[in-house]
Every structure is written in structure tokens, then in C-alpha cells.
Image: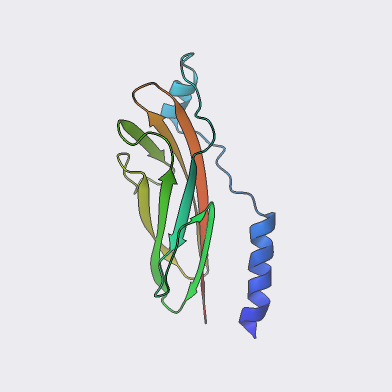
Amino acid sequence: MNIKVLFPAVLSFFITSNVQADKQPPVMEEILNQPETQQFSGSEFMECFVDTPALDQFTRNVCFSVANARTTTAVFRIQGGPSSNFRVIWSDSRCSQNSKSCSLPIFQYRSISISADVLNLSNNQFFSVSAQAFYEGFN
């Protein structure tokens, strides 16, 4: 019974919530102040999934899973932008600046919001993306 009540509340939260990525790391402020810096076209995005025994698939911007395990992994992946010669400035320091994907532990009844600024080192263009992962339990 609790699951039936919880799911509409969580779904309502998804619809009304806004992923925030307002704060720029100091390095990005320097890049933004350079006149030759331009943003990408806007076709770039972040996707994620929360790893469970089910067949997990990436979804754009927001992902959600329910399982019995108290801890699992949230996987975030950046789509678009340069395929080489780039630097990623993740909002979580556990993520690598040389990778467009990041895996983080997530606990039941918690969420992870993550953002990333991707800089193309060949031409100083950049873009920003973000996503949010939610993990619920059956307890």
C-alpha cells in the first residue's frame, strides 16, 4: 500500500522539480570571460540510470529505480560534444575530468543531482548539462 501512495508523490515531484546547475566552477568563470568562447548548439544532454537487477536503460535528464538493495550505483553519461580533446568539469569531484561518464553510489530513498561543463579544448567552445537520479526501496 505504501508504494502506491509513494509513487504518485515521487512522480509529482519529478514534474514540479527543477534540476539546478547555476553555480559555475572557478575554471568555467575564466573560460566564460574569454571573448572567443562560444556555447555549443544545445543538442548535448546528460542521461542516467540507477543500476538494479532489472534491465536498466539510460533516460534523458532524470532516472528512477526501485529495488531491495540499500545501496546501488547511479550511472551518468554525457551525450554530444567533442569525442576527443575535451575536459569535463563535474559537480562531483569523484568523477574524472577525462571521461564523459561517471558512476556514483546511491542509497535508498535518496537522490543525486549532478552537473557538468564540457570544454572542447580544440576551439574553446563549451556546454553545460545536468541530470538527477532517484532511488527508492521496497521497505
For the point 44% across and 67% down, which residue is it?
Answer: 107
Q: Is residue 77 above or below residue 111?
A: above
Instruction: State the residue at coordinates (36%, 51%).
Output: 102
- In the picture, residue 55 is in which quadrant? bottom left
Number of marks in picture: 0
* Viewer-side residue, 88 vs 110: 88
Task: Tell me where residue 80 appears, x and y as whole percent.
Answer: 44, 39
Residue 36 appears at what percent x and percent y? 46, 14
Q: Is residue 121 above or below residue 8?
A: above
Left or right of 128? Residue 83 is: left
Where is residue 99 shown, x and y percent of the image? 32, 43
Instruction: Pick whichever, 48 or 27, lies toward us.
Output: 48
Name the quarter where the N terminus is drawn: bottom right
Q: Position of residue 73 (x, y in %)?
A: 38, 63
Q: Residue at x 68, y 69 (%)?
A: 9
Residue 13 vs 37, above or below: the answer is below
Q: Residue at x 65, y 54 (%)?
A: 17
Q: Is residue 30 above or below residue 102?
A: above
Identify the colour scheme used: rainbow
Q: On the image, which quarter does residue 126 sit in?
A: top left
Q: Nearer the viewer, residue 111 or 50?
A: 50
7 lies left or right of 116? right
Most distant residue in the top direction: 35
Given residues 80 and 102, the one toward you in this image is 80
- Image quadrant in which you'd find residue 124: top left
